[in-house]
Amino acid sequence: MILFETKVKFWQMWKKYVLNAFKSEREEYHIGYVRLNPDETDLSWTPTEENIEKVETALLGIDYQPNYFSFADKGQVTSMRQMYVDTDGYWRQIHIRVHEDGEIRGHDELSYEDSAIDHVKGVGAQEIYDSAKTNVLAILRNL
């Protein structure tokens, strides 16, 4: 257990001090907004530690995991991913980013475990398929 906790701490530090140094503008694929209740006009979500933890816990509940090895967009407060194997046998990930204003953006891409170079180049990156968007919005629109 100590080894696992050490690895998690290492990747948290890596993300905080290395990858966050290379922040870019927001990615192109808008999904929606985090909501604290189902009222679509409620824009009251704020990036408190408690609210970020709610987002992460909700995504963990639908098989997402922290994405430690990812560059950060400006204003991003968390980054999570869901892994899967496509029909050609490639490891892919659905990468979700939540920003300080509650905006959710994300994309589907090759995982860095499958091909680190192609992952960084953005080979095969695409919009998230509709059922994945629906799942993410369903869970993050009513925290």
Image (cartoon, rainbow, N blue to C red):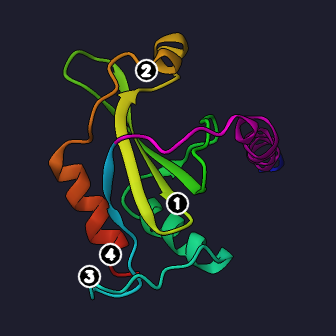
Query: Mark on residue 122?
Result: 2
Q: Earlier in the sequence, mark 3 or mark 1?
A: 3
Q: Which residue is mark 4?
A: 141
Q: Which residue is mark 1?
A: 99
Q: Earlier in the sequence, mark 3 or mark 2?
A: 3
Identify residue type, mark 2.
Answer: Gly
Label 1 crowding class (10 Å Cα cut-off): few <14, some 14-19, many 20+?
many
Residue at the (32%, 51%) spot, across then down: 30
Q: Earlier in the sequence, mark 2 or mark 4?
A: 2
Q: Main secondary structure of the magenta part?
A: helix
Spatial CA span between label 2 and label 4: 29 Å
- Residue 122 rendering spot, x and y as whole percentages: 43, 20
What residue range appears in magenta?
Answer: 3-28
Locate residue 82 relative to residue 126 in the image: left or right: right
| Label 2 element class | loop
| Label 3 element class | loop
User: Which of the two marks, 3 or 4, is nearer to us in this view?
Assistant: 3
Instruction: Give yes or no for residue 20 being in the magenta stretch.
Output: yes
Label 2 crowding class (10 Å Cα cut-off): few <14, some 14-19, many 20+?
few
Q: Which residue is mark 3?
A: 40
| Label 4 element class | loop
Identify residue type, mark 3.
Answer: Glu
Spatial CA span between label 3 and label 2: 33 Å
- Residue 4 rendering spot, x and y as whole percentages: 74, 45
Spatial CA span between label 3 and label 1: 17 Å
